[in-house]
Image (cartoon, rainbow, N blue to C red):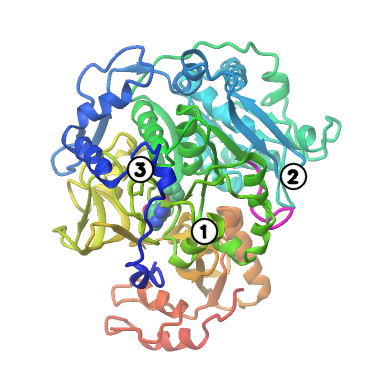
Amino acid sequence: MVVPGQQNTEEKVFYPPEDLRVDAHVPDLNSYRALYKKSIEEPEEFWRDVAQEFYWKEPPSGRMLQYNFDVTKDKVQIKFMEGAKTNMCYNVLDRNVLDRNLGTKVAFHWEGNSPDHHLTITYSQLLKQVCRCANALKQMGVQKGDRVAIYLPMIPELVYSMLACARIGAVHSIVFAGFSSESLAERIMDAQCTVLVTADGVYRGEKLIKLKQISDEALDHCREKGSLTVQKCLVVKHHAFRIHGNDTCNKLQTRWNAECDVWWDEAVDSESDECDPEWMDAEDPLFILYTSGSTGKPKGVLHTIAGYLLYTSLTFKYVFDHHHDDIYWCTADIGWITGHSYITYGPLANGATSVLFEGIPIHPHVGRFWEIIEKYSVSKFYTAPTAIRLLMKYGREPLNKYDLSSLRVLGTVGEPINPEAWLWYHDAVGQGRCPVVDTFWQTETGGHVLTPLPGATPLKPGSATLPFFGVLPTILNEHGEELEGEAEGYLVFQRPWPGIMRGVYGNQERFENTYFRKFPGFYVTGDGCRRDKDGYYWITGRIDDMLNVSGHLLSTAEVEAALSEHSAVAEAAVVSRPHSVKGECLYCFVTLKDCREFNHTLMDELKRKVREKIGPIATPDFIQNAPGLPKTRSGKIMRRVLRQIARNEKDLGDLSTLADPNIVEVLLSQRCEAAA
Ligand code: WT7
């Protein structure tokens, strides 16, 4: 994606504020450079020092880090602290309660969708809840290595259940509670989960989402496909209890299968609040999290225990310059990697106090974010460009009603941030006092890889600035040649850092093909990137068939497959088009079968199809009737041309390879001006 205005603002630099530098973990650029140098030149020592903070039942049997990135030589693999024995849950909870005396410290201020609902959870309360849940999972037959699907909204039970899995050595697979039943089913089947944790229902803004009903439909899909692995479904009474305050209000339940379904309060609350942690190998799996793949089928990104613990913990500490008295708030959903790394694991590993927010930015009013910042005196705030652009639309007035003087550091993640949004965030939200850390990373990287450090790095709006410790970025040209100095090309990484993914669940070949085949010896991010004269990195957006809608990756193939399932559709091609709030949105070209008519009913059906297959996030903004698609003589769709049509670009470049150049004129004359 082209970031508008990027070139012009490049010269504007924002230096770290003095009051922040006074007690910053990394107080200037020289300290950053020294630590970075050590992390690259002496990685074993660097990470051994970091590991000292944590609890190890046994030390690693060999080196800290072993890996192969060269797919032409051997299998691609990454091993960090192999042989060491530890437990993730012990490190983020017991260690804080027992060794660091943080039992009475607040781990989470839970704030509901409605301002009337809130709850405070200390570290020792969290530990007890997690143990109860862990015991209940064991009762349900969950053993070390088993996969547990979690389909929950942003409620405390989501944190309890993921940490309960970590405690007993089960592998969690969290599915964002906005995905459809088919998406949930696909993910459950791929990981062969034996337990599903869900809730009766939840309000997101004004909208009621019937999670148990969607879960039932998902299990029906699994059954139809002949691969129902789920034996138990644990259901939180969130809608009935927490929202309506009584058990009798149970109108949401469409079905109750007594052999499979278990209420959370019946199964969990009566369990003991103690549960011995399972001692795991450093390289045992911690979780699977699905992310869109360019072939259409989501990939189960696999992360393991020790490396992920060290990396999320260290990035959290440095990137947000975390201190004991901070109140931190990340507005992401735990259903995405941002929530895994920077709501659950990173903050808890540091003994931080966080806000856990169930709702959305503009409900019940457009000042909801600012109200929460004031209510809890939030000092570190982490959100997405799409949320910033949405809130920008309402101007500064909603901000003026609240006291935001507690804020010290602001962060963004998910997509390139345009300098206009960056400056508004910095000036209107941060009142010009707070550095904005633009953190570039991916589900696959586990944690921040290109990012400023707020006390050290001079900022340029729109740039993710410099690599984090242990990260060695490189820019390659099309031929795989390394580019030095000022350059633009493919962003790749030369070696692993502890938090990088270990594989695609159950599919080593796909892991190697997706990330390591194109340029042997490098991890390929799929993003384009420019390095400026100061060595700063500027992400220019995806360079594969992926698009970024509101900070979430979708593959065009995934949406095309959903559209093609409609009986009227002969062929579909999907491209991205810039969108003022979402960043990018979907523009679909649809060729109908003979004698099918293109009308509003059909458009609604197509949209519904995509929502059912993937989820509301993937709802197309534009659907154009395409009597034909621009193809090469060998039959390959020329997406470049479709993208240009969708964006109304006049110069379509070289069309000589098209089998039928006339189709371009037809498509241009009928392009959609307004959203469908
Ligand atoms: C893709 C990864 C990492 C959590 C959220 C998304 C884009 C992410 C930035 C940023 C420019 C960014 C990239 C990346 N992206 N952060 N700060 N600047 N682009 O996780 O769904 O795995 O998506 O998001 O294109 O590859 P994800």
User: In the image, what residue type sits under mark 3?
Assistant: Thr
Q: Is residue 643 above or below residue 66?
A: below
- Quarter of the image for the N terminus: give it: bottom left
State the residue at coordinates (43%, 44%): 20
Q: Say which residue label 1 marks.
A: 425
Q: Is mark 3 within 8 Å of ligand 1?
A: yes
Residue 591 at x, y = what percent?
50, 74
Q: Is mark 1 within 8 Å of ligand 1?
A: no
Q: Residues within 10 Å of mark 1 (few under 14, many from 20)?
A: many
334 left or right, relative to 311: right
Residue 61 at x, y = what percent?
23, 16
Label whose residue precedes the other's in the sequence (2 or 3): 2
Q: Which portion, as a residue range, is magenta?
A: 357-366
Judging depth in this view, the residue of 431 and 364 nearest the camera is 431
342 left or right, relative to 318: right
The chief SS type of the magenta part is: loop
Answer whether residue 265 is magenta in the image.
Answer: no
Q: Say which residue label 2 marks.
A: 114
State the residue at coordinates (41%, 82%): 649
User: In the image, what residue type sits under mark 2?
Assistant: Ser
Answer whether residue 360 is magenta in the image.
Answer: yes
State the residue at coordinates (60%, 38%): 355
User: In the image, what residue type sits under mark 1?
Assistant: Tyr
Q: Say which residue label 3 marks.
A: 445
Q: Residues within 10 Å of mark 2 (few under 14, many from 20)?
A: some
Instruction: State whether residue 297 appears in this view.
Output: no
- Judged from the image, the secondary structure of the residue bearing numbered disc 3 is loop
Q: Residue furthest right?
A: 248
| Tag 2 and tag 1, C-beta contact below 8 Å | no
Q: CA distance from mark 1 to mark 3?
A: 26 Å
